[in-house]
């Protein structure tokens, strides 16, 4: 069977598939722990019987019993080297049984592994796993393929590509959806449909999942966009556990009624999954007798997908902003990170652009001294995980684009394909293979024509070439190609003509990179924004822009209202009704306070940015350093402590105040000699350490900060410190207190070692301990002098142990 | 002994609950007052920390062969010695071992902030990371629940970790080896601590679902 005859078959009648094979095998005695493929080959008559019953019930397509026939699944039984044999023989048995009565589909199913970018298994390795199985099934003579029960869109893509790269037979791709109509990895039905039908699946659908009732929703969601037939293979209801066994108890009569509902909703291929029997299929057959497939009338759409989201755009949709910031040109930090294989800046730019309203992210990593292909693949994998929006893959290298398209788990936008011979011949087949949309760049080997009418000709030539690969106008986005108005003042108008002509005459979506237009001019934001508004007025669909620009995003939002693309102005109202634009930052009023009171206030508020300036001002006004500390800073930090105790402050506020205090102390220290009464006194010395074997020390660090701010001299020895070093350093430093921390039960025992060593060496020192697993009683047990549950308590305890309270 | 079938996630999509992050920092609703400035500081720190957290994970299932008052014996002969865990797994036929980790960058950033006089940011980073690593386990449990729901089963509502109750921390090493956690760049010290610091191991049970 070829793809055309498959299409004709499904358009001519409702095609019936078989029901569950696993359920039937269990009824016929397959042991629970057996490898189904192996067992069936050892008991071929059982399979023949089951399949004959399905054929008799009316199935037009039966599935070869190869659900777990891939290398990874067979490995669980040590049978990974028999993939070709198993698949060939199982397909052969099914073909013999089917004869001329029905078709046989090779059955591909999940490998059970998680594929990159979501999991750690290489995408191409999974493609190869499926290819091996496909090869065996082809040798056995299957007529088509059904990829079923898939939980992850990326693994489904791998299976579809494996079939496409091995043969020209039709392939149906079916995923499982939960009651919220999402796959296990959060893909929705529309995203699944658009991604897989773009990739070349001949039918898309849902199987297993829930019962028929919930699967109707999936069909309803898919149908408006379905360019290919929809397949359903629901379970016989929802699973129930009876006597330790999972059962599905929907009767054939009820199941058969749902078959009618599925036809009415538009499904063209109907079968059954877990729990269904030949009787279920027979009842479905009887009920749909005489019914014809509902003609699919998919809405013309322009859509890109990630694995978790579809973004529609074009005439009736608001202008789509493609975030331009992931591009190393002129970005030193991003360039450095990409060169060093780091991606924190990519993540930051992605998150920032999405937050600011970008619906698609352009990804360009081209720069000198970098392996662009490797970097592009890494960035695409990263972004596919960390953002939900689709990607626009931007490179001048066909190799880079092909690698990125292969790994991208959705339907991407290629930026771009021009009429340059080396590009168009290479890129169109690649774009077709991976189902991508592309940005058409109206330039050729001779460069960019200045006049719009010359660009029209190039655009038509590229479209005509693209149609040879079955592209439709709705798969293409034309770039108006903006040149700088500073060198040619008619450049903008020529681009606008291209946009107008594409949107009107051609019916193509259009895009423009805004920033070129203003190159060489001051205050470029005004030019860019005005050009955006003019572009939208002429039918522009997408803009490659910086979504952080409030002016750009504001003009876009306003234009969407004025062109009626923002229905009922809801987005605009949502964006601006709270007056969030350029809201002036609230300034804390401290002006009516005396300078020393402002210092007090700064400690209370944890304002370390301004405290040094305030101290300088107070000193200039004649305040003495000791007075500033004792009269204003200490009371403030004491008040902070009380607020913390009362839970009116929480930890970040306590620590910010401590940091402001430290900043102030550090500045005042040189002024203190001879001024402050207490300056001549030796402050108590505390040695802090996280004990040997323990590496968690954030709590100890906070304790250190708080102790310093309360007048203690703190020597922090760090983490994983031996008892010998703690004792030795404490002796040398004449410590009055040793503070020990430990997080775990395995390391807290080391505290006892330290205490015992100190006692055995006659060191006169107090011990305080802290950490998640210790408490007062443990402190007493090991001979420590106290336990503090947090940094604030640690200060109080230290004061008590040194006789300050 | 059959090798456990361990699944690895290269990225776990987590959006930690802001209120839980604040709670980790000692915030008490209706008592603690946060100014606009504090809110801005916290939001910026949370945003920065989230950029540095790349949640990865691993899990596998293992059948329970035998359970006594203080011991759970698994199909591969591994014994988990703990009365509390045994009680926790009372209705379970299988255990799920899980781990999540955030990578080194966030831990290094927390340390850097603490050492460079920016402890308040370090604290928030730390709270965010702790919440993210926990949320990653929640996500994994939800994921596993979806896969076993069709069999009429569900995970225990809570999870257990080595170090809880009487489950000795050395079980951390046992599970570390089962999950082969070096594949997601986690190492374990001789005192059974996981590195990077923001890494956790947990155990849940698989039970019959009554929903």
Image: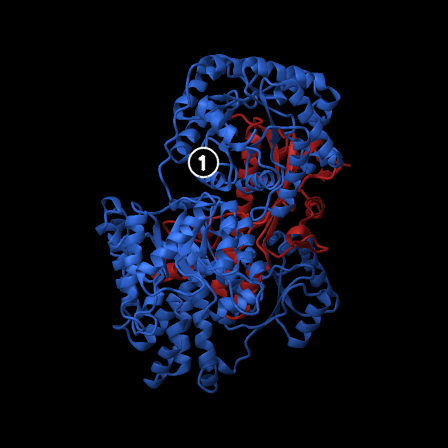
Q: Under tag 1, what secondary structure?
A: helix
Q: Position of residue B203 (x, y in %)?
A: 63, 40
Residue A738 picture quarter: bottom right
State the residue position of label 1: A189
Residue B34 picture quarter: bottom left
Q: Position of residue B122 (x, y in %)?
A: 51, 62
Can the viewer see residue B19 in this picture? no
Residue B95 picture quarter: top right
Q: Position of residue A740 (x, y in %)?
A: 63, 62
Can the viewer see residue A30 in this picture? yes
Name the one closer to the observer, A3 or A345. Answer: A3
Total numbered labels: 1
Q: Chain of mark 1?
A: A
Q: Colour of chain A?
A: blue
Other residues around mark 1 within 10 Å, as few (<14) / some (14–19) / many (≥20)? many
Q: Colour of chain B?
A: red
Looking at this rendering, what residue extends furthest in the right direction?
Answer: B1
Q: Position of residue A80 (x, y in %)?
A: 73, 36
């Amino acid at each position: 069977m070829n793809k055309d005859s498959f299409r004709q078959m499904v358009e001519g009648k409702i095609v019936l598939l078989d029901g569950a094979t696993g359920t039937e095998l269990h009824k016929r005695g397959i042991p629970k722990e057996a490898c189904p493929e192996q067992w069936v080959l050892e008991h071929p008559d059982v399979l023949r019987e089951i399949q004959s019953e399905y054929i008799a019930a009316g199935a037009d397509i039966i599935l070869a019993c190869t659900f777990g026939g891939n290398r990874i699944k067979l490995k669980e039984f040590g049978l990974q080297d028999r993939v070709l044999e198993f698949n060939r023989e199982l397909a052969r048995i099914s073909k013999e049984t089917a004869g001329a009565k029905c078709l046989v589909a090779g059955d591909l199913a999940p490998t059970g592994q998680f594929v990159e970018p979501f999991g750690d298994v290489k995408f191409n390795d999974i493609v190869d796993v499926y290819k091996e199985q496909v090869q065996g099934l082809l040798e056995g003579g299957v007529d088509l393929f059904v990829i079923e029960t898939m939980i992850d869109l990326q693994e489904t893509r791998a299976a579809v590509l494996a079939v496409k790269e091995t043969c020209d037979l039709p392939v149906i791709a079916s995923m499982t959806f939960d009651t919220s109509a999402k796959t296990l990895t959060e893909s929705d039905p529309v995203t699944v449909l658009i991604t897989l039908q773009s990739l070349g699946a001949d039918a898309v659908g849902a199987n297993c999942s829930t019962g028929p009732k919930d699967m109707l929703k999936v069909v309803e969601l898919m149908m408006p966009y379905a360019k290919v037939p929809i397949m359903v293979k629901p379970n016989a209801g929802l699973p129930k556990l009876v006597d330790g066994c999972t059962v599905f108890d929907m009767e054939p009569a009820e199941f058969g009624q749902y078959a009618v509902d599925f036809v009415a909703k538009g499904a063209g291929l109907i079968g059954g999954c877990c729990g269904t029997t030949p009787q279920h299929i027979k009842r479905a057959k009887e009920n749909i007798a005489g019914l014809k497939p509902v003609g699919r009338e998919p809405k013309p759409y322009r859509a890109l997908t990630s694995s978790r989201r579809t973004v529609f755009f074009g005439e009736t949709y608001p202008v789509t902003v493609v975030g331009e910031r992931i591009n190393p040109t002129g970005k030193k930090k991003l360039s450095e990170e990409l060169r060093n294989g780091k991606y924190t800046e990519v993540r930051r730019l992605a998150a920032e652009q999405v937050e600011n309203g970008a619906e698609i992210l352009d990804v360009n990593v081209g720069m000198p001294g970098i392996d662009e292909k490797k970097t592009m693949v890494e960035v695409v994998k990263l972004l596919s995980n960390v953002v939900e929006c689709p990607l626009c893959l931007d490179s001048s290298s066909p190799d880079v684009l092909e690698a990125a398209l292969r790994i991208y788990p959705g339907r991407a936008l290629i930026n771009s394909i021009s009429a340059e011979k080396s590009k168009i011949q290479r890129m169109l087949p690649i774009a077709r293979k991976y189902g991508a949309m592309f940005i058409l760049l109206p330039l050729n080997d001779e460069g960019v024509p200045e006049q719009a009418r010359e660009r029209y000709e190039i655009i038509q030539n590229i479209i005509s070439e693209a149609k040879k690969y079955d592209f439709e106008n709705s798969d293409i986005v034309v770039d108006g190609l903006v040149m700088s108005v500073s060198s040619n003042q008619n450049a903008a108008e020529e681009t606008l003509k291209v946009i107008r002509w594409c949107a009107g005459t051609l019916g193509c979506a259009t895009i423009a990179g805004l920033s070129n237009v203003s190159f060489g001019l001051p205050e470029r934001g005004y030019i860019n924004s005005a050009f955006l508004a003019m572009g939208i007025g002429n039918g522009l669909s997408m803009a490659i822009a910086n979504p952080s620009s409030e002016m750009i995003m504001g003009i876009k939002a306003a234009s969407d209202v004025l062109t009626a693309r923002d229905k009922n102005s809801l987005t605009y109202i949502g964006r601006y009704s709270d007056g969030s634009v350029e809201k002036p930052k609230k300034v804390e009023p401290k002006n009516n306070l005396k300078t020393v009171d402002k210092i007090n206030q700064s400690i209370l508020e944890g304002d370390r940015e301004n405290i040094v300036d305030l101290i300088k001002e107070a000193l200039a006004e004649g305040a003495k350093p000791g007075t500033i500390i004792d009269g204003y800073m200490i009371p403030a930090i004491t008040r902070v402590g009380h607020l913390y105790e009362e839970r009116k402050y929480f930890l970040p506020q306590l620590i910010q105040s401590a940091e402001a205090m430290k900043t102030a102390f550090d500045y005042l220290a040189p002024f203190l000699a001879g001024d402050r009464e207490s300056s001549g006194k030796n402050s108590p010395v505390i040695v802090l350490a996280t004990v040997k074997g323990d590496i968690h020390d954030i709590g100890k660090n906070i304790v250190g900060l708080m102790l310093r701010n309360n007048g203690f001299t703190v020597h922090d020895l760090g983490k994983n410190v031996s008892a010998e070093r703690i004792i030795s350093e404490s002796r040398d430093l004449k410590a009055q207190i040793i503070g020990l921390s430990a997080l775990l039960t395995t390391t807290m025992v080391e505290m006892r070692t330290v205490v015992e060593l100190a006692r055995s060496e006659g060191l006169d020192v107090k011990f305080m301990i802290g950490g998640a697993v210790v408490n007062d009683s443990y402190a007493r047990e090991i001979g420590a002098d106290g336990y503090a549950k947090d940094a604030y308590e640690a200060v109080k305890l230290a004061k008590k142990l040194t006789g300050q309270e | 002994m059959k090798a456990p079938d361990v699944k690895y996630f290269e990225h776990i999509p987590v959006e930690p609950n802001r209120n839980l992050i604040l709670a980790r920092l000692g915030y008490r609703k209706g008592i603690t007052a946060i100014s606009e400035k504090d809110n801005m500081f916290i939001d910026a720190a949370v945003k920065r920390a989230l950029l540095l957290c790349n949640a990865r994970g691993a899990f596998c299932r293992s059948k329970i062969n035998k359970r006594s008052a203080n011991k759970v014996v698994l199909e591969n002969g591994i014994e988990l010695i703990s009365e509390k865990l045994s009680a926790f797994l009372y209705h379970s036929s299988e255990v799920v071992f899980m781990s999540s980790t955030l990578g080194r960058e966030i831990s290094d950033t927390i340390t850097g902030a603490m050492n460079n006089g920016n402890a308040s940011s370090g604290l928030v980073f730390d709270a965010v990371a702790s919440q993210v690593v926990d949320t990653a386990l929640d996500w994994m449990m939800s994921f596993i629940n979806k896969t076993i729901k069709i069999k009429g089963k569900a995970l225990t509502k809570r999870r257990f970790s080595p170090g809880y109750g009487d489950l000795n921390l050395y079980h951390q090493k046992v599970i570390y080896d089962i999950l082969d956690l070096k594949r997601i760049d986690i190492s374990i010290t001789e005192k059974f601590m996981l590195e990077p610091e923001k890494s956790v191991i947990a155990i849940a049970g698989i039970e019959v679902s009554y929903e």
